[in-house]
Image: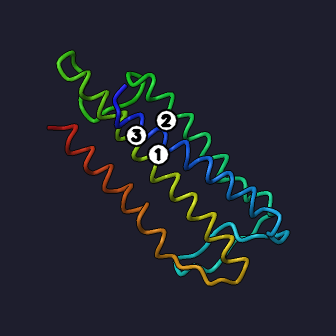
Amino acid sequence: MDTVFIILRIINISLLIGVWFFSFKNYKNLPDKIPTHFNIVGEPDRFSSKKFFYFLPIIATLLLGLFFYLSNFPESANYTVEITPENEQSQYKMGIVFSQIILFFCLLLFFIIQDFTVKYVADKKPSLANIVLPIVGLFLTIMVYTVLSNT
């Protein structure tokens, strides 16, 4: 396996462990009802039971499993170009690496959302600015992958 892929996999597993640890650590301090959706200015517009706080870590775990499956069986994924014997290895390698980068930004986004929720219920006036980095990172990664895979 490629070193970059291994490093990205270790980072993603560590980030997922961090999301779960953060969630377990802060769960007991949450009120019975927590905000589960925020509008564009960061005000809650939907509330749920505090059990919902584990929704994002569960989704993150499922995403990690899906992306690891696709990394082990890259031929099962869809690609932006036709896979031929000439481009097969480069397309699979690029798809695997970029999928791990996309996973990283998704996990980071989930972690930031969990942190935002904890800070909001603690009246610490969280900022939505932190959410920009993973969203921009996701879009840039997808754009760069699309350009590189078609060259």
Residues under labels 3 and 2: Cα distance?
Answer: 7 Å
| Pointer 3 with pointer 1, Cβ within 8 A | yes
Residue 11 rendering spot, x and y as whole percentages: 48, 45
Front residue of this view, candidates 36 and 118: 118
For residue 147, side relative to residue 95 (left or right): left
Residue 19: give x, y in percent of width and height.
62, 54
Is 60 rendered above or below residue 137? Answer: above
User: Mark 3 highlights which residue?
Assistant: 99
Local SS, label 1: helix
User: Which residue: 46% across, 29% down?
Assistant: 70
The residue singled out by tag 1 in the image is: 103
**Quarter of the figure with the C terminus:** top left
Q: Amino acid at mark 3?
A: Ser
Q: Return the disc, 2 or 1, that comes first in the chain's sequence.
A: 2
Find residue 147 and report its horizontal and vertical position in percent: 20, 45
Give yes or no for contact between labels 3 and 2 (Cβ–Cβ under 8 Å). yes
From the viewer's side, name the closer residue of 45 and 110: 110
Mark positioned earlier in the residue sequence (3 or 2): 2
**Crowd around label 3: few <14 · some 14–19 · many ≥20 (10 Å):** many
Tell me how far mark 2 sits from mark 1, CA to CA: 7 Å
Disc 3/disc 1 C-alpha distance (Å): 6 Å
Mark 2 and mark 1 in contact? Answer it, CB < 8 Å: yes
Residue 106 placement, left or right of 43: left
Q: Vertically, is 64 above or below 2?
A: below
The residue where tag 2 is placed is 67
Which secondary structure lies at badge 2?
A: helix
User: Quadrant of the rendered structure where residue 92 is?
Assistant: top left
Crowd band around label 2 with a 10 angstrom C-alpha radius: few (<14), some (14–19), many (20+): many
- Secondary structure, mark 3, is helix
